[in-house]
Image: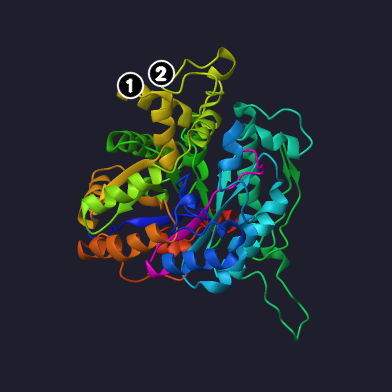
Amino acid sequence: MSPTRQIKLGLFVRPAGNHIASWRHPDSHADAGANFQRFVEMARTAERGLFDMLFQADTQSAWTAEGEGMRRQHYVAWLEPLGLMSALSGYTRHIGLACTQTTTYDEPYTLARRFATLDLISGGRAAWNVITSGNPTEAQNFGRDVHADKVDRYKRAREFVQVVSGLWDSWDDDAFIRDRDSGIFFDENKMHVLNHRGEHFNVRGPLNVPRSPQGRPVIIQAGSSDAGREMAAESADVVFSAANDIGEARAYYSDLKGRMGRYGRDPDEIKVLPGVAFSVAPTEQEAIKKYEELQDLIHPDIAIGLASRRIGFDLRPFPKDGPLPTPPDKVAGDRSSRSYMMYEVARRENLTIIQLAKRFAAARGHFFVTGSPAMVVDVLEDWFKNGACDGFNMIPPLYPNSLDDFVNLVVPEMQKRGLFRTRYEGKTLRENLGLAHPPSRYAAANVAAAQ
């Protein structure tokens, strides 16, 4: 292992915290979803902790829970992430700005333009988390009665990413000469018209935003299904994964990296960051107490409602202290990778519906580690050094406390062991992640033709 290899960190941003009951905790900022200054505080704390990037998930619907759980969830509404990241760029200098935008309910040209703009505004710190919209209620906000099935969503998504990537290559790095004497603003030989015609999109181009300092925004994906892994192997720079133990994480890491060769890519071109929720304190007993305080605030309605949404059918009619039922035939074939994971955990540990729901509600299916700083770093180091990841997407249960605890307690322990940076290495997100500056496809073709 190279001695220079170090852990990369993303911060999963949720207004009051990632734990489903965080807003009920007396130390939380329950209004954070509508309070921009709270996001500024998060961003500055994460930058003080030398995180690689902020990451905000998103959905195009307020309907993200079932029944009574709907009115109990704190992330029914928050700030639109692309606008939020653009605003945060002015309050930060180094940290990457990553957010979710859907390929199912958007268009490649407008999305490419928005992210290219964020990349220029931030000096090369933008990242796009590609999703196909797993929430079926989004369809009704875009004039559709039925959400497209998973196969069709992924077909559209792969072409969507290809178009966006092509548009980001519309201009060479030195296309804009801005010669006042000659009156020539740009070199037309360094402008490239995409002229894409495909199954889902016809896009002429070029994009009317210049190329950014990092070449193009970083592309992130979080899909764990076979289709998701294939798309990630083809086009992603960073992958956010979910695993309940190091064995699952290692299997995913090996499988994804092994797929990249068929696309002519080196395994080091993707950074795999599994999500890890945590409760850390000076002692293990204090950390456990913090975790239990939040778990005790979970209402069964919100836990079972959230689990129902994720697992793909309504669990509320079944006895909450009974076993997890077999899914109906109509949803069995379109279940997500997270759904399969939930079933596997319930089967392996013989969990009841409410036990599984509360477990899932704590970190939405991600690994949860609890303990002292040394204990937490022991786990992170084990995963990092033993083929499970390139870093982590950290999931603080409670803002601001959990993030403060991580930055003040865990980061110094990682630095002491040489696992984590003591300063930012570069100016762009790609530089800090250790990813190469991507050449324009047209520049690469010219180099190849000249050889």
Q: Nearer the viewer, residue 124 or 353?
A: 353
Q: Nearer the viewer, residue 44 or 402?
A: 402
Element marked by disc 1: loop
Residue 93: % across, % down: 49, 73
**Number of residues whose C-alpha sits closer than 10 Å to that of mark 2, classed few (under 14), some (14–19) or many (20 or more):** some
Q: Quadrant of residue 334?
A: top right
> Would residue 37 be found to the left or right of residue 254 on screen?
right
> For the view shown, which residue lies furthest in the bottom direction?
181
Cβ–Cβ under 8 Å for marks 1 and 2 = yes
Q: Quadrant of residue 442?
A: bottom right
The residue under label 1 is which amino acid type?
Asn
Identify the colour scheme used: rainbow
State which region is magenta: 47-64
Residue 181: % across, % down: 75, 86
| Residue position marked by numbered label 1 in the rendering | 350
- Which residue corresponds to the image point at 72% horizontal and 27% vertical from the top-left? 146
Number of numbered discs: 2
| Residue position marked by numbered label 2 in the rendering | 323
- Which residue corresponds to the image point at 49% horizontal and 37% vertical from the top-left? 223
Element marked by disc 2: loop
Q: Earlier in the sequence, mark 1 or mark 2?
A: 2
**Number of residues whose C-alpha sits closer than 10 Å to that of mark 1, classed few (under 14), some (14–19) or many (20 or more):** few
Q: Tell me if residue 429 is in the magenta stretch.
A: no
- Which residue corresponds to the image point at 34% horizontal and 36% vertical from the top-left? 244
Say above or below: 345 vs 266. above
Say the numbered circle drawn on residue 247.
none
Q: CA distance from mark 1 to mark 2?
A: 8 Å
Q: Quadrant of residue 352?
A: top left
Say above or below: 35 vs 320. below
